[in-house]
Image (cartoon, helix red, strand yellow):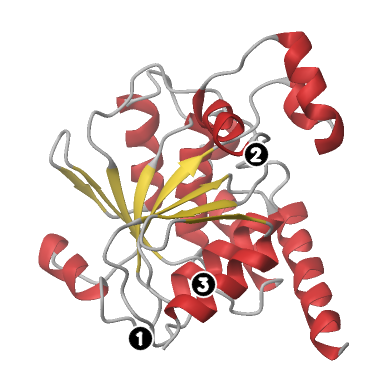
């Protein structure tokens, strides 16, 4: 009973963090150009600057290989210093252009110009305000996704279907971050009106509107419905939906 109470309280705090971002990182307007090779993002979930970058990736519908770098982490933090010269986050590596970028506002500008073929939206041009509001959103999470915990490193990279503003996907990403588990983030932001209707009505709405594209369509074909978050683990052959189920699985499988 107590465990359920704390789980409910944590979910409520994640909802509060979602509300504080005023819709950023939910809707996607896909970038017209797609990188041939996966972008790489060194970051940690609790960082307000990293959150801004993840939101932009959702909005541009770009996939990215996330290498979690929580405080105290030893798996990927040293690599950031080797590649860029300092342990600062977020840190984006684009193997398609050999670009290596630190500052969140510079990363966002790069993503929009390089792949979006457009300027950064007006609500992101005041970087200090955007990151300030992002910091407020992080307060509700009470440090989740900040500190590393001992874990076993998977041999193959996991995949997570997510969009940044989802309060349920956030809790899964926090667990992946704390355990320093690398994963391919398959961004599945909402692209059409049908994506906003309740899950039990969504399939019928999508049938009437015709097939969608992108990761939401791929997930629907794979799982029979769009359920965010959705985890694919090639190491065990498991595929799971539902936030709590995924987090329990990650703890039991990879926590040391």
Residue 107 placement (x, y as % from top left):
35, 44
Quadrant in which the N terminus is drawn: bottom right
Residue 175 placement (x, y as % from top left):
53, 72
Image quadrant where residue 196 sits:
top right
Numbered badge on residue 250: 3
Q: Which residue is mark 1?
A: 72
- How many angstroms separate mark 3 from mark 1 (CA)? 19 Å
Which residue is found at the position 27% from the left and 40% from the top? Answer: 38
Q: Give the mark nearest the N terminus, 1 or 2.
A: 2
In this rendering, position of residue 15 left or right of residue 104: right
In this view of the protein, which residue sits in the foreground, 24 or 149?
A: 149
Position of residue 148 relative to residue 29, above or below, is below
Q: Give the mark nearest the N terminus, 3 or 2.
A: 2
- How many angstroms separate mark 1 from mark 2 (CA)? 30 Å
Q: Which residue is mark 2?
A: 26
What SS does tag 3 mark?
Answer: helix
Viewer-nearest of labels 3 and 2? 3
What SS does tag 2 mark?
Answer: loop
What SS does tag 1 mark?
Answer: loop
Quadrant in which the C terminus is drawn: bottom left
Which residue is found at the position 46% from the left and 83% from the top? Answer: 147
Q: Report if the CB atoms under discs 3 and 1 are less than 8 Å apart.
A: no
């Amino acid at each position: 009973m107590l465990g359920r109470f704390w789980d409910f309280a944590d979910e409520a705090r994640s909802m509060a963090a979602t509300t504080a971002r005023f819709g950023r990182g939910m809707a996607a307007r896909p970038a017209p150009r797609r990188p041939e090779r996966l972008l790489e993002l060194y970051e940690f979930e609790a960082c307000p600057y990293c959150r801004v970058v993840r939101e932009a990736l959702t909005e541009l519908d770009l996939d990215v290989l996330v290498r979690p770098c929580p405080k105290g982490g030893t798996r990927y933090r040293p690599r950031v210093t080797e590649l860029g010269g300092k342990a600062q986050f977020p840190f984006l590596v684009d193997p398609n252009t050999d670009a290596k970028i630190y500052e969140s506002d510079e990363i966002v500008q790069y993503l929009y110009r390089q792949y979006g073929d457009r300027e950064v939206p007006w609500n992101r041009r005041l970087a200090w305000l955007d990151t300030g509001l992002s910091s407020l959103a992080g307060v509700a999470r009470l440090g989740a996704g900040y500190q590393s915990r001992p874990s076993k490193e998977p041999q193959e990279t996991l995949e997570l279907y997510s969009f940044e503003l989802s309060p349920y996907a956030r809790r899964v990403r926090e667990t992946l971050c704390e355990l320093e588990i690398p994963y391919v983030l398959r961004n599945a932001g909402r692209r059409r009106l049908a994506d906003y209707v309740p899950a039990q009505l969504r399939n019928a709405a999508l049938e009437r509107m015709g097939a969608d594209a992108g990761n939401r369509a791929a997930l629907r074909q794979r799982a029979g419905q769009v359920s965010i978050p959705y985890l694919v683990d090639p190491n065990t052959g498991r595929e799971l939906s539902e936030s709590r189920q995924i987090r329990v699985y990650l703890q039991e499988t990879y926590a040391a």
